[in-house]
Amino acid sequence: MMQKNIFNNKQEVAEAFAKYLSEQIEKSETFHLALSGGSTPKILFEHLAKEYSDKIDWRKVHLYWGDERCVPPNDEDSNYGMTHAKLLQHVKIPESNIHRVLGENNPAEEADRYGKRIEWNLKLKNGRPVFDLIILGMGGDGHTASIFPHQMELMDASETCGVATHPDSGQKRITITGEVINAAKEIHFLVTGASKKPVLDEIFNKKGNYKSYPASYVKEAQWWLDEDAWEEGKTDL
Ligand code: 6PG
């Protein structure tokens, strides 16, 4: 079942999701959380750093990245680098709970290493590691994590992580695969801005090219949207 939570703007999306996330962490003993990259989660990370540094018991939280760009951590393109600047350096999370993708290493070797790390740390169900919660974004081309329309095979790959190639820049990426995404206890898309509306319309209404969008194959997800991305049925905070 697809649930949509729609808010007035990006800030409200970040605030509502941060509250939800903190409640889920509160209920757990250990919480294995996979983060998305790109621009949308920046507001969420800033809000978590500002409002939840003492409200969340970060000792419970283990952080992973659903995808990473194959660059060093201090590169401007690094999802880890962005998360460190916006969140990690502002909260008391044990270093050993931060499971960074070594974007500076050989992509194939790193995909293998990171996959094994995830399989080692997480409970397995039908041989698949189970995250407590995965945060996903969606590109204007319908990609999610770093599973792009030209590499749909990553949606049903047997490995936990794979190597992807950005269709325009050719940049190499490490990404968790579709089966691991769909094995998660909870999956939440944070998608904001008018540029995402055409693809959301196709996915939600199963029309146009929706079958060519990796994001269409994510099951049981909750969608956190601003009204620029999707108007129908706004949610009160
Ligand atoms: C990445 C992401 C990617 C992102 C989408 C949306 O590393 O780029 O994880 O999947 O979520 O590209 O990006 P924006 O939030 O910047 O629109």
Image (cartoon, rainbow, N blue to C red):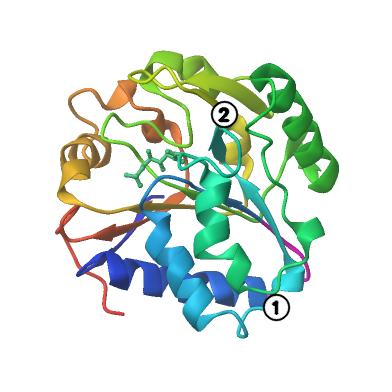
Residue drawn at (65%, 28%), measured in percent from left and top? 161
Is residue 126 shown to the viewer in this render?
no
Q: Nearer the viewer, mark 2 or mark 1?
A: 2
Q: Which residue is mark 2?
A: 70
Name the quadrant where ligand 1 sits. Answer: top left
Residue at (70%, 74%) from the top-left corner?
A: 92
Confirm whether the magenta stretch covers residue 185.
Answer: no
Q: Nearer the viewer, residue 73 or 91?
A: 73
> Quick one: which residue is furthest to the front in this view?
74
Viewer-nearest residue: 91 or 139: 91
Residue 199 visible to the viewer: yes
- Where disc 1 sits, the SS reads loop
Check disc 1 and report the residue beneath it.
Answer: 57
Q: Is residue 127 above or below residue 62?
A: above
User: x%, y% of residue 146?
Assistant: 48, 31
- Report the magenta residues as a range: 27-32
- The quarter of the image holding the C terminus is bottom left
Q: Is residue 236 left or right of residue 221?
A: left
Q: Secondary structure at mark 2?
A: loop
Mark 2 surroundings: few (<14), some (14-19) or many (≥20) residues within 10 A? many
Which x, y percent locates residue 75?
A: 52, 40
Query: Is the stretch drawn in magenta largely helix, strand or loop?
Result: loop
